[in-house]
Image (cartoon, rainbow, N blue to C red):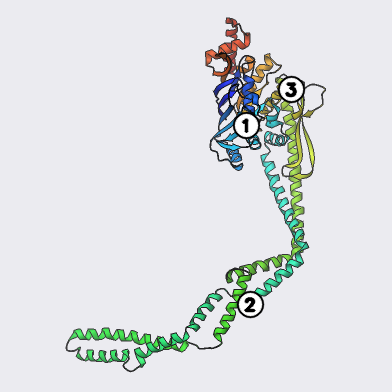
Amino acid sequence: MLINLTITNFAIIDRLEVQFDEGFNVLTGETGAGKSIILDAFGLLLGDRARPDLVRAGASEATVEALFDLTGRDDILQAFTAAGFAVDNELVLRRIVQSGGRSRAYVNGNLVTLAQLQPLSELLVTVCGQHEHQSLLQRNVHLTVLDRFGNLDEHLRLYRESYGLMQKIVQQLECLEVAERDRQQRLDFLRHQADEINSVQLLPGEEEELLAERLLLQSAERLAGVTRGGYEALYEGHGAVCEVLGVLVSELKSVGEVDPELAELAETVQRGLFELEDVSLRLRSYLGRIAFEPNRLEVIEERLAILTRLKRKYAPSVVEILVLLEAFEQEITELENAQETRDNLSEELIASAAESRALGESLSAVRKQAAQALEEGLLEELAALAMPGASFGVAFTELDSPGPDGHERIEFMVSSNPGEPLMPLAKVASGGELSRMMLALKRLAPEADSVPTVIFDEVDAGIGGAAATAVGRKLQVVSRTSQILCVTHLPQVAAFADHHHRVVKRELDGRTLTAVEHLGNGERVQEMARMLGGATVTEQTLLHAKELVSTSSAS
Protein backbone atom coordinates (compact mmCIF):
# COMPACT_ATOMS: atom_id res chain seq x y z
CA MET A 1 0.00 0.00 0.00
CA LEU A 2 0.95 3.66 -0.32
CA ILE A 3 2.62 4.95 2.84
CA ASN A 4 3.97 8.37 1.92
CA LEU A 5 3.68 10.88 -0.91
CA THR A 6 6.14 13.74 -1.19
CA ILE A 7 5.71 16.51 -3.79
CA THR A 8 8.24 19.31 -4.28
CA ASN A 9 8.05 22.39 -6.55
CA PHE A 10 5.07 21.00 -8.42
CA ALA A 11 2.61 23.56 -9.86
CA ILE A 12 1.55 25.65 -6.83
CA ILE A 13 2.97 23.14 -4.35
CA ASP A 14 6.21 24.25 -2.69
CA ARG A 15 6.67 21.11 -0.61
CA LEU A 16 3.97 18.73 0.44
CA GLU A 17 4.27 15.46 2.33
CA VAL A 18 1.28 13.23 3.10
CA GLN A 19 1.21 10.08 5.20
CA PHE A 20 -1.44 7.58 4.13
CA ASP A 21 -2.76 4.59 6.06
CA GLU A 22 -4.52 1.38 5.19
CA GLY A 23 -8.26 1.51 4.80
CA PHE A 24 -10.32 4.42 3.45
CA ASN A 25 -8.41 7.71 3.01
CA VAL A 26 -10.37 10.73 1.84
CA LEU A 27 -9.10 14.08 0.51
CA THR A 28 -11.41 17.07 0.65
CA GLY A 29 -11.03 20.80 0.24
CA GLU A 30 -12.48 23.81 -1.45
CA THR A 31 -12.61 24.02 -5.21
CA GLY A 32 -9.26 25.16 -6.54
CA ALA A 33 -7.36 24.17 -3.40
CA GLY A 34 -5.15 21.78 -5.36
CA LYS A 35 -6.74 18.34 -5.13
CA SER A 36 -6.44 17.85 -8.88
CA ILE A 37 -2.76 18.82 -8.67
CA ILE A 38 -2.15 15.92 -6.28
CA LEU A 39 -3.82 13.61 -8.78
CA ASP A 40 -1.61 15.03 -11.52
CA ALA A 41 1.38 14.15 -9.36
CA PHE A 42 0.14 10.56 -9.13
CA GLY A 43 -0.22 10.59 -12.89
CA LEU A 44 3.48 11.36 -13.26
CA LEU A 45 4.35 8.33 -11.12
CA LEU A 46 2.13 6.26 -13.38
CA GLY A 47 3.98 7.40 -16.49
CA ASP A 48 2.11 10.50 -17.67
CA ARG A 49 3.92 12.81 -20.07
CA ALA A 50 5.95 15.50 -18.31
CA ARG A 51 5.22 19.17 -19.11
CA PRO A 52 7.29 22.27 -18.33
CA ASP A 53 4.28 24.00 -16.71
CA LEU A 54 4.25 21.34 -13.98
CA VAL A 55 7.41 22.86 -12.48
CA ARG A 56 6.72 25.58 -9.91
CA ALA A 57 7.63 29.04 -11.15
CA GLY A 58 11.21 29.92 -10.22
CA ALA A 59 12.24 26.29 -9.55
CA SER A 60 14.61 24.26 -11.73
CA GLU A 61 12.79 20.96 -11.29
CA ALA A 62 9.78 19.31 -9.69
CA THR A 63 9.88 16.01 -7.82
CA VAL A 64 7.17 13.49 -6.97
CA GLU A 65 8.11 10.58 -4.72
CA ALA A 66 5.97 7.76 -3.31
CA LEU A 67 6.87 5.12 -0.72
CA PHE A 68 5.01 1.79 -0.82
CA ASP A 69 4.88 -1.07 1.68
CA LEU A 70 4.80 -4.39 -0.21
CA THR A 71 4.71 -6.72 2.78
CA GLY A 72 2.82 -9.85 1.80
CA ARG A 73 2.69 -8.91 -1.89
CA ASP A 74 5.06 -11.49 -3.32
CA ASP A 75 3.35 -11.22 -6.71
CA ILE A 76 4.38 -7.56 -7.05
CA LEU A 77 7.88 -8.20 -5.69
CA GLN A 78 8.34 -10.97 -8.27
CA ALA A 79 7.16 -8.68 -11.07
CA PHE A 80 9.75 -6.03 -10.15
CA THR A 81 12.45 -8.69 -9.77
CA ALA A 82 11.57 -10.15 -13.18
CA ALA A 83 11.92 -6.66 -14.63
CA GLY A 84 15.45 -6.46 -13.23
CA PHE A 85 14.88 -4.40 -10.07
CA ALA A 86 15.97 -5.73 -6.68
CA VAL A 87 13.28 -4.66 -4.19
CA ASP A 88 12.32 -5.60 -0.66
CA ASN A 89 9.19 -4.85 1.30
CA GLU A 90 9.66 -1.10 0.82
CA LEU A 91 9.63 0.44 -2.65
CA VAL A 92 10.22 4.04 -3.70
CA LEU A 93 9.06 5.50 -7.02
CA ARG A 94 10.44 8.92 -7.96
CA ARG A 95 9.78 11.14 -10.95
CA ILE A 96 11.77 14.34 -11.57
CA VAL A 97 10.62 16.92 -14.12
CA GLN A 98 13.01 19.67 -15.21
CA SER A 99 11.84 23.16 -16.10
CA GLY A 100 12.66 22.45 -19.74
CA GLY A 101 10.23 19.55 -19.79
CA ARG A 102 12.70 16.65 -19.65
CA SER A 103 12.11 14.08 -16.94
CA ARG A 104 13.73 11.14 -15.17
CA ALA A 105 12.15 8.24 -13.32
CA TYR A 106 13.61 5.99 -10.62
CA VAL A 107 12.69 2.72 -8.91
CA ASN A 108 14.49 2.42 -5.56
CA GLY A 109 17.11 4.83 -6.86
CA ASN A 110 17.62 2.98 -10.16
CA LEU A 111 17.00 4.96 -13.33
CA VAL A 112 14.15 3.54 -15.45
CA THR A 113 12.50 4.44 -18.72
CA LEU A 114 8.84 5.46 -18.83
CA ALA A 115 8.18 2.29 -20.81
CA GLN A 116 9.45 0.33 -17.80
CA LEU A 117 7.83 2.56 -15.18
CA GLN A 118 4.27 2.53 -16.47
CA PRO A 119 3.45 -1.21 -16.33
CA LEU A 120 5.25 -1.59 -13.00
CA SER A 121 3.64 1.41 -11.31
CA GLU A 122 0.20 0.28 -12.44
CA LEU A 123 0.73 -2.86 -10.37
CA LEU A 124 0.78 -0.55 -7.34
CA VAL A 125 -1.87 2.10 -8.03
CA THR A 126 -4.92 2.40 -10.24
CA VAL A 127 -6.72 5.72 -10.69
CA CYS A 128 -10.45 5.49 -11.34
CA GLY A 129 -11.46 8.61 -13.21
CA GLN A 130 -8.46 8.86 -15.54
CA HIS A 131 -8.97 6.24 -18.20
CA GLU A 132 -5.36 5.51 -19.03
CA HIS A 133 -4.51 4.28 -15.53
CA GLN A 134 -7.46 1.99 -14.80
CA SER A 135 -6.38 -1.62 -14.85
CA LEU A 136 -9.98 -2.76 -15.27
CA LEU A 137 -10.19 -0.85 -18.55
CA GLN A 138 -7.64 -3.20 -20.06
CA ARG A 139 -9.48 -5.93 -21.92
CA ASN A 140 -6.86 -8.57 -21.09
CA VAL A 141 -7.69 -8.06 -17.38
CA HIS A 142 -11.39 -8.80 -17.80
CA LEU A 143 -10.88 -12.56 -18.10
CA THR A 144 -8.89 -12.59 -14.86
CA VAL A 145 -11.60 -10.56 -13.12
CA LEU A 146 -14.31 -12.97 -14.26
CA ASP A 147 -12.34 -16.08 -13.28
CA ARG A 148 -11.54 -14.72 -9.83
CA PHE A 149 -15.12 -13.58 -9.33
CA GLY A 150 -16.38 -17.06 -10.19
CA ASN A 151 -13.67 -18.86 -8.16
CA LEU A 152 -12.60 -20.65 -11.33
CA ASP A 153 -8.91 -21.01 -10.48
CA GLU A 154 -9.07 -24.82 -10.29
CA HIS A 155 -10.97 -25.09 -13.59
CA LEU A 156 -8.38 -22.83 -15.22
CA ARG A 157 -5.45 -24.77 -13.71
CA LEU A 158 -6.74 -28.10 -15.03
CA TYR A 159 -7.32 -26.64 -18.47
CA ARG A 160 -3.89 -25.00 -18.63
CA GLU A 161 -2.15 -28.24 -17.62
CA SER A 162 -3.99 -30.16 -20.33
CA TYR A 163 -3.42 -27.42 -22.92
CA GLY A 164 0.28 -27.29 -22.04
CA LEU A 165 0.62 -31.07 -22.50
CA MET A 166 -1.14 -30.85 -25.86
CA GLN A 167 1.17 -28.05 -26.99
CA LYS A 168 4.20 -30.08 -25.93
CA ILE A 169 3.07 -32.99 -28.11
CA VAL A 170 2.43 -30.61 -31.01
CA GLN A 171 5.97 -29.25 -30.65
CA GLN A 172 7.40 -32.78 -30.62
CA LEU A 173 5.54 -33.61 -33.82
CA GLU A 174 6.72 -30.40 -35.44
CA CYS A 175 10.30 -31.28 -34.52
CA LEU A 176 9.84 -34.71 -36.11
CA GLU A 177 8.46 -33.16 -39.27
CA VAL A 178 11.41 -30.79 -39.51
CA ALA A 179 13.82 -33.65 -38.82
CA GLU A 180 12.19 -35.87 -41.44
CA ARG A 181 13.48 -33.68 -44.26
CA ASP A 182 17.07 -34.33 -43.22
CA ARG A 183 16.47 -37.73 -41.63
CA GLN A 184 18.23 -39.91 -44.20
CA GLN A 185 21.21 -37.58 -44.48
CA ARG A 186 21.49 -37.49 -40.72
CA LEU A 187 21.14 -41.28 -40.52
CA ASP A 188 23.96 -41.82 -43.02
CA PHE A 189 26.17 -39.41 -41.12
CA LEU A 190 25.46 -41.01 -37.73
CA ARG A 191 25.90 -44.54 -39.04
CA HIS A 192 29.26 -43.63 -40.57
CA GLN A 193 30.48 -42.18 -37.29
CA ALA A 194 29.09 -45.05 -35.22
CA ASP A 195 30.68 -47.62 -37.57
CA GLU A 196 34.03 -45.84 -37.38
CA ILE A 197 33.99 -45.93 -33.58
CA ASN A 198 32.65 -49.49 -33.39
CA SER A 199 35.30 -50.76 -35.82
CA VAL A 200 37.98 -49.80 -33.31
CA GLN A 201 36.27 -51.83 -30.54
CA LEU A 202 37.09 -49.46 -27.74
CA LEU A 203 37.26 -50.72 -24.18
CA PRO A 204 36.96 -48.60 -21.00
CA GLY A 205 40.39 -48.21 -19.37
CA GLU A 206 42.17 -49.56 -22.46
CA GLU A 207 44.25 -46.46 -23.05
CA GLU A 208 45.56 -46.37 -19.50
CA GLU A 209 46.56 -50.06 -19.69
CA LEU A 210 48.34 -49.53 -23.03
CA LEU A 211 50.25 -46.55 -21.69
CA ALA A 212 51.36 -48.54 -18.65
CA GLU A 213 52.45 -51.51 -20.80
CA ARG A 214 54.34 -49.24 -23.20
CA LEU A 215 56.27 -47.77 -20.28
CA LEU A 216 57.21 -51.26 -19.11
CA LEU A 217 58.37 -52.32 -22.57
CA GLN A 218 60.39 -49.16 -23.05
CA SER A 219 62.13 -49.87 -19.71
CA ALA A 220 62.44 -53.66 -20.11
CA GLU A 221 66.26 -53.86 -20.31
CA ARG A 222 66.72 -51.66 -17.27
CA LEU A 223 64.13 -53.61 -15.27
CA ALA A 224 65.77 -56.91 -16.24
CA GLY A 225 69.19 -55.67 -15.20
CA VAL A 226 68.01 -54.44 -11.82
CA THR A 227 66.02 -57.57 -10.97
CA ARG A 228 68.75 -59.98 -12.17
CA GLY A 229 71.42 -58.14 -10.16
CA GLY A 230 69.22 -58.13 -7.11
CA TYR A 231 68.49 -61.85 -7.38
CA GLU A 232 72.14 -62.72 -7.76
CA ALA A 233 73.18 -60.46 -4.87
CA LEU A 234 70.61 -61.95 -2.55
CA TYR A 235 70.61 -65.59 -3.47
CA GLU A 236 72.41 -66.99 -6.50
CA GLY A 237 75.77 -65.17 -6.72
CA HIS A 238 79.03 -66.07 -5.00
CA GLY A 239 78.92 -64.76 -1.46
CA ALA A 240 75.18 -64.03 -1.76
CA VAL A 241 73.53 -62.34 1.20
CA CYS A 242 71.25 -65.29 1.94
CA GLU A 243 74.24 -67.70 1.95
CA VAL A 244 76.19 -65.47 4.37
CA LEU A 245 73.16 -65.09 6.66
CA GLY A 246 72.59 -68.87 6.62
CA VAL A 247 76.09 -69.45 7.91
CA LEU A 248 75.62 -66.79 10.60
CA VAL A 249 72.37 -68.39 11.78
CA SER A 250 74.14 -71.77 12.15
CA GLU A 251 77.00 -70.28 14.12
CA LEU A 252 74.74 -68.32 16.45
CA LYS A 253 72.64 -71.38 17.12
CA SER A 254 75.77 -73.40 17.94
CA VAL A 255 76.73 -71.02 20.71
CA GLY A 256 73.14 -70.40 21.78
CA GLU A 257 73.44 -73.13 24.37
CA VAL A 258 76.24 -71.18 26.00
CA ASP A 259 74.41 -67.82 25.99
CA PRO A 260 70.60 -67.67 25.44
CA GLU A 261 70.91 -64.07 24.23
CA LEU A 262 72.79 -65.28 21.14
CA ALA A 263 70.05 -67.85 20.53
CA GLU A 264 67.51 -65.03 20.39
CA LEU A 265 69.68 -63.16 17.91
CA ALA A 266 69.87 -66.30 15.79
CA GLU A 267 66.07 -66.38 15.57
CA THR A 268 65.99 -62.70 14.56
CA VAL A 269 68.52 -63.25 11.80
CA GLN A 270 66.57 -66.36 10.72
CA ARG A 271 63.38 -64.32 10.25
CA GLY A 272 65.29 -61.76 8.17
CA LEU A 273 66.76 -64.57 6.10
CA PHE A 274 63.30 -65.96 5.37
CA GLU A 275 62.09 -62.54 4.15
CA LEU A 276 65.15 -62.02 1.94
CA GLU A 277 64.71 -65.48 0.45
CA ASP A 278 61.09 -64.54 -0.37
CA VAL A 279 62.27 -61.29 -2.02
CA SER A 280 64.83 -63.20 -4.09
CA LEU A 281 62.17 -65.65 -5.28
CA ARG A 282 59.87 -62.77 -6.31
CA LEU A 283 62.74 -61.10 -8.16
CA ARG A 284 63.38 -64.33 -10.06
CA SER A 285 59.66 -64.59 -10.90
CA TYR A 286 59.49 -60.96 -12.08
CA LEU A 287 62.62 -61.55 -14.22
CA GLY A 288 60.88 -64.48 -15.87
CA ARG A 289 57.86 -62.33 -16.81
CA ILE A 290 59.84 -59.59 -18.55
CA ALA A 291 59.18 -60.11 -22.27
CA PHE A 292 61.31 -58.84 -25.06
CA GLU A 293 58.73 -59.13 -27.85
CA PRO A 294 60.17 -56.90 -30.56
CA ASN A 295 56.78 -56.26 -32.27
CA ARG A 296 54.66 -55.68 -29.15
CA LEU A 297 55.80 -52.10 -28.64
CA GLU A 298 55.03 -51.34 -32.28
CA VAL A 299 51.52 -52.80 -31.90
CA ILE A 300 50.90 -50.68 -28.81
CA GLU A 301 52.09 -47.50 -30.56
CA GLU A 302 49.78 -48.16 -33.50
CA ARG A 303 46.81 -48.73 -31.18
CA LEU A 304 47.54 -45.55 -29.22
CA ALA A 305 47.79 -43.60 -32.50
CA ILE A 306 44.31 -44.85 -33.46
CA LEU A 307 42.92 -43.76 -30.07
CA THR A 308 44.57 -40.34 -30.43
CA ARG A 309 42.97 -39.84 -33.84
CA LEU A 310 39.54 -40.76 -32.49
CA LYS A 311 39.97 -38.45 -29.51
CA ARG A 312 40.98 -35.59 -31.78
CA LYS A 313 37.89 -36.17 -33.93
CA TYR A 314 35.21 -37.02 -31.38
CA ALA A 315 36.00 -36.36 -27.72
CA PRO A 316 38.96 -35.80 -25.33
CA SER A 317 38.85 -39.30 -23.78
CA VAL A 318 37.90 -42.89 -24.61
CA VAL A 319 35.14 -42.80 -21.98
CA GLU A 320 33.62 -39.70 -23.59
CA ILE A 321 33.87 -41.30 -27.04
CA LEU A 322 31.92 -44.30 -25.74
CA VAL A 323 29.28 -41.98 -24.27
CA LEU A 324 29.06 -40.20 -27.61
CA LEU A 325 28.73 -43.55 -29.41
CA GLU A 326 25.80 -44.42 -27.14
CA ALA A 327 24.15 -41.09 -28.06
CA PHE A 328 24.75 -41.77 -31.75
CA GLU A 329 23.18 -45.20 -31.52
CA GLN A 330 20.20 -43.87 -29.57
CA GLU A 331 19.58 -41.17 -32.18
CA ILE A 332 19.96 -43.73 -34.98
CA THR A 333 17.29 -45.86 -33.27
CA GLU A 334 15.00 -42.85 -32.92
CA LEU A 335 15.46 -41.85 -36.55
CA GLU A 336 14.94 -45.42 -37.75
CA ASN A 337 11.77 -45.58 -35.66
CA ALA A 338 10.62 -42.05 -36.49
CA GLN A 339 7.43 -43.19 -38.17
CA GLU A 340 6.48 -45.33 -35.20
CA THR A 341 7.24 -42.43 -32.86
CA ARG A 342 5.19 -40.08 -35.02
CA ASP A 343 2.25 -42.49 -35.03
CA ASN A 344 2.41 -42.81 -31.25
CA LEU A 345 2.60 -39.04 -30.78
CA SER A 346 -0.31 -38.55 -33.19
CA GLU A 347 -2.41 -40.91 -31.09
CA GLU A 348 -1.35 -39.09 -27.92
CA LEU A 349 -2.25 -35.77 -29.54
CA ILE A 350 -5.74 -36.95 -30.43
CA ALA A 351 -6.36 -38.04 -26.84
CA SER A 352 -4.75 -34.91 -25.37
CA ALA A 353 -6.67 -32.59 -27.70
CA ALA A 354 -9.94 -34.29 -26.78
CA GLU A 355 -9.20 -33.86 -23.06
CA SER A 356 -8.14 -30.24 -23.55
CA ARG A 357 -11.24 -29.51 -25.62
CA ALA A 358 -13.51 -31.04 -22.98
CA LEU A 359 -11.84 -29.08 -20.18
CA GLY A 360 -12.00 -25.91 -22.29
CA GLU A 361 -15.69 -26.39 -22.94
CA SER A 362 -16.27 -27.01 -19.24
CA LEU A 363 -14.32 -23.83 -18.43
CA SER A 364 -16.39 -21.87 -20.95
CA ALA A 365 -19.61 -23.16 -19.42
CA VAL A 366 -18.70 -22.16 -15.86
CA ARG A 367 -17.42 -18.82 -17.14
CA LYS A 368 -20.80 -18.10 -18.72
CA GLN A 369 -22.49 -18.97 -15.43
CA ALA A 370 -20.10 -16.66 -13.59
CA ALA A 371 -20.69 -13.94 -16.20
CA GLN A 372 -24.45 -14.12 -15.64
CA ALA A 373 -23.98 -13.83 -11.88
CA LEU A 374 -21.55 -10.92 -12.39
CA GLU A 375 -24.01 -9.13 -14.69
CA GLU A 376 -26.89 -9.51 -12.23
CA GLY A 377 -24.83 -8.50 -9.22
CA LEU A 378 -23.25 -5.52 -10.94
CA LEU A 379 -26.61 -4.11 -12.07
CA GLU A 380 -27.79 -4.18 -8.44
CA GLU A 381 -24.62 -2.39 -7.36
CA LEU A 382 -24.98 0.26 -10.08
CA ALA A 383 -28.63 0.88 -9.17
CA ALA A 384 -27.52 1.68 -5.61
CA LEU A 385 -24.89 4.06 -7.02
CA ALA A 386 -27.41 6.31 -8.81
CA MET A 387 -27.08 4.47 -12.14
CA PRO A 388 -30.42 2.60 -12.27
CA GLY A 389 -30.62 2.82 -16.06
CA ALA A 390 -27.15 1.40 -16.64
CA SER A 391 -26.65 -1.91 -18.40
CA PHE A 392 -23.74 -4.31 -18.13
CA GLY A 393 -22.81 -7.41 -20.07
CA VAL A 394 -19.94 -9.80 -20.61
CA ALA A 395 -19.24 -10.34 -24.32
CA PHE A 396 -17.77 -13.73 -25.26
CA THR A 397 -15.82 -14.05 -28.51
CA GLU A 398 -14.73 -17.54 -29.52
CA LEU A 399 -11.10 -17.72 -30.53
CA ASP A 400 -10.11 -19.14 -33.91
CA SER A 401 -8.05 -21.68 -31.99
CA PRO A 402 -7.89 -22.39 -28.24
CA GLY A 403 -5.29 -20.52 -26.24
CA PRO A 404 -3.63 -21.00 -22.85
CA ASP A 405 -6.51 -19.15 -21.14
CA GLY A 406 -9.35 -21.01 -22.82
CA HIS A 407 -11.52 -21.03 -25.90
CA GLU A 408 -12.74 -17.45 -25.74
CA ARG A 409 -11.85 -13.82 -25.28
CA ILE A 410 -14.15 -11.73 -23.11
CA GLU A 411 -14.79 -8.03 -22.74
CA PHE A 412 -16.93 -6.05 -20.30
CA MET A 413 -19.64 -4.03 -22.08
CA VAL A 414 -21.62 -1.19 -20.50
CA SER A 415 -24.28 1.36 -21.25
CA SER A 416 -24.84 4.29 -18.95
CA ASN A 417 -28.38 5.17 -20.06
CA PRO A 418 -31.51 3.22 -21.04
CA GLY A 419 -31.86 2.58 -24.74
CA GLU A 420 -28.17 3.02 -25.51
CA PRO A 421 -26.30 0.04 -26.92
CA LEU A 422 -23.71 -1.77 -24.86
CA MET A 423 -20.22 -0.47 -25.57
CA PRO A 424 -16.77 -1.64 -24.47
CA LEU A 425 -16.00 -0.46 -20.93
CA ALA A 426 -12.97 1.47 -22.19
CA LYS A 427 -15.24 3.72 -24.29
CA VAL A 428 -17.43 4.97 -21.42
CA ALA A 429 -17.15 8.76 -21.57
CA SER A 430 -18.17 10.05 -18.15
CA GLY A 431 -15.42 9.92 -15.55
CA GLY A 432 -17.96 9.87 -12.71
CA GLU A 433 -19.96 7.01 -14.19
CA LEU A 434 -16.80 5.13 -14.99
CA SER A 435 -15.53 5.53 -11.43
CA ARG A 436 -18.80 4.21 -10.03
CA MET A 437 -18.64 1.22 -12.35
CA MET A 438 -15.14 0.54 -11.11
CA LEU A 439 -16.36 0.86 -7.54
CA ALA A 440 -19.22 -1.56 -8.25
CA LEU A 441 -16.79 -4.11 -9.70
CA LYS A 442 -14.42 -3.71 -6.76
CA ARG A 443 -17.32 -4.08 -4.36
CA LEU A 444 -18.71 -7.17 -6.09
CA ALA A 445 -15.38 -8.86 -6.84
CA PRO A 446 -12.84 -7.49 -4.32
CA GLU A 447 -10.18 -10.08 -5.18
CA ALA A 448 -10.52 -9.66 -8.93
CA ASP A 449 -8.26 -6.64 -9.25
CA SER A 450 -5.10 -7.20 -7.22
CA VAL A 451 -3.82 -3.60 -7.31
CA PRO A 452 -3.27 -2.71 -3.62
CA THR A 453 -4.08 1.03 -3.84
CA VAL A 454 -7.09 2.46 -5.69
CA ILE A 455 -7.62 6.19 -6.16
CA PHE A 456 -11.20 7.30 -6.89
CA ASP A 457 -11.72 10.66 -8.56
CA GLU A 458 -15.08 11.98 -9.73
CA VAL A 459 -16.85 9.02 -8.12
CA ASP A 460 -19.32 11.51 -6.61
CA ALA A 461 -19.88 13.51 -9.81
CA GLY A 462 -23.57 14.27 -10.37
CA ILE A 463 -24.94 12.46 -7.33
CA GLY A 464 -26.01 13.32 -3.81
CA GLY A 465 -28.26 12.23 -0.97
CA ALA A 466 -28.85 8.50 -0.64
CA ALA A 467 -26.70 7.70 -3.68
CA ALA A 468 -23.76 9.56 -2.13
CA THR A 469 -24.23 7.62 1.11
CA ALA A 470 -24.26 4.38 -0.87
CA VAL A 471 -21.04 5.37 -2.60
CA GLY A 472 -19.39 6.16 0.74
CA ARG A 473 -20.53 2.90 2.28
CA LYS A 474 -19.27 0.84 -0.69
CA LEU A 475 -15.94 2.64 -0.62
CA GLN A 476 -15.67 1.74 3.04
CA VAL A 477 -16.38 -1.92 2.28
CA VAL A 478 -13.87 -2.02 -0.59
CA SER A 479 -11.22 -0.43 1.66
CA ARG A 480 -11.19 -3.58 3.79
CA THR A 481 -9.39 -5.42 0.97
CA SER A 482 -7.69 -2.51 -0.85
CA GLN A 483 -6.28 0.80 0.30
CA ILE A 484 -8.64 3.50 -0.96
CA LEU A 485 -7.83 7.16 -1.67
CA CYS A 486 -10.85 9.19 -2.67
CA VAL A 487 -11.11 12.83 -3.71
CA THR A 488 -14.64 14.00 -2.94
CA HIS A 489 -16.80 17.10 -2.48
CA LEU A 490 -19.60 15.22 -0.72
CA PRO A 491 -19.74 14.94 3.08
CA GLN A 492 -21.87 11.78 2.75
CA VAL A 493 -18.89 10.10 1.10
CA ALA A 494 -16.21 11.61 3.33
CA ALA A 495 -18.08 10.56 6.47
CA PHE A 496 -17.22 6.89 5.87
CA ALA A 497 -13.45 7.48 5.69
CA ASP A 498 -11.03 6.01 8.21
CA HIS A 499 -8.57 8.89 7.61
CA HIS A 500 -9.51 12.40 6.55
CA HIS A 501 -7.07 14.76 4.78
CA ARG A 502 -7.91 18.36 3.87
CA VAL A 503 -6.25 20.10 0.95
CA VAL A 504 -5.87 23.83 1.64
CA LYS A 505 -4.53 26.74 -0.35
CA ARG A 506 -2.69 29.55 1.39
CA GLU A 507 -0.88 32.70 0.38
CA LEU A 508 2.64 33.34 1.72
CA ASP A 509 4.81 36.27 0.72
CA GLY A 510 2.59 36.92 -2.25
CA ARG A 511 2.73 33.33 -3.51
CA THR A 512 0.02 30.68 -3.47
CA LEU A 513 0.85 27.40 -1.72
CA THR A 514 -1.04 24.12 -1.39
CA ALA A 515 -0.81 21.98 1.74
CA VAL A 516 -2.48 18.84 3.07
CA GLU A 517 -3.63 18.57 6.67
CA HIS A 518 -4.54 15.37 8.48
CA LEU A 519 -7.71 16.10 10.43
CA GLY A 520 -8.47 14.96 13.95
CA ASN A 521 -12.02 14.35 15.10
CA GLY A 522 -12.85 17.96 15.90
CA GLU A 523 -11.25 19.33 12.74
CA ARG A 524 -13.00 16.68 10.71
CA VAL A 525 -16.41 17.77 11.98
CA GLN A 526 -15.56 21.38 11.07
CA GLU A 527 -14.54 20.29 7.54
CA MET A 528 -17.70 18.22 7.15
CA ALA A 529 -19.79 21.21 8.31
CA ARG A 530 -18.06 23.38 5.68
CA MET A 531 -18.86 20.78 3.02
CA LEU A 532 -22.48 20.75 4.17
CA GLY A 533 -23.07 24.47 4.58
CA GLY A 534 -20.43 26.25 2.54
CA ALA A 535 -18.60 29.28 3.87
CA THR A 536 -21.05 29.81 6.74
CA VAL A 537 -20.86 27.10 9.39
CA THR A 538 -23.83 27.12 11.77
CA GLU A 539 -24.65 25.12 14.86
CA GLN A 540 -27.13 23.19 12.76
CA THR A 541 -24.51 22.21 10.17
CA LEU A 542 -22.10 21.24 12.95
CA LEU A 543 -24.74 18.96 14.48
CA HIS A 544 -25.48 17.50 11.08
CA ALA A 545 -21.76 16.92 10.50
CA LYS A 546 -21.36 15.18 13.86
CA GLU A 547 -24.37 13.01 13.09
CA LEU A 548 -22.97 12.07 9.69
CA VAL A 549 -19.60 11.06 11.16
CA SER A 550 -21.07 9.10 14.05
CA THR A 551 -23.69 7.35 11.89
CA SER A 552 -21.12 6.40 9.25
CA SER A 553 -18.62 5.18 11.84
CA ALA A 554 -21.26 2.93 13.37
CA SER A 555 -22.29 1.39 10.03
**SS class, disc 3:** loop
Kindly tell me whether residue 496 is visible in this rendering.
no
Above or below — where is 536 with respect to 310?
above
Amino acid beneath label 1: Ser
Pointers 2 and 3 in contact (C-beta within 8 Å) = no
Of the residues under marks 3 and 1, which one precedes in the sequence? 1
**The N terminus: image quadrant:** top right
N-terminal-most mark, 2 or 1: 1
What's the distance in space between the residues labelled 2 and 1, CA to CA? 71 Å
Q: Helix or strand or loop: what does disc 2 sit on?
A: helix
Residue named by callout 1: 103
Q: Name the residue type under label 2.
A: Val
Quadrant position of the C terminus in the picture? top right
Please state the horizontal and vertical placement of residue 144, each as a whole percent of the image.
69, 36
Give the image quarter of residue 15.
top right
| Type of the residue with mark 3 | Ser
Residue 157: where, in percent of width, then height? 67, 43
Compared with 279, 334 (above or below) is above
Residue 412 vs residue 65: left or right?
Answer: right
Q: Which residue is mark 3?
A: 430
Q: What secondary structure is found at the residue carrying circle 1?
A: strand
The residue under the point 22% across, 89% down is: 252
Q: Residue at x 72, y 36 (%)?
A: 140
Image coordinates of residue 267 in percent, x first then y, are 26, 85
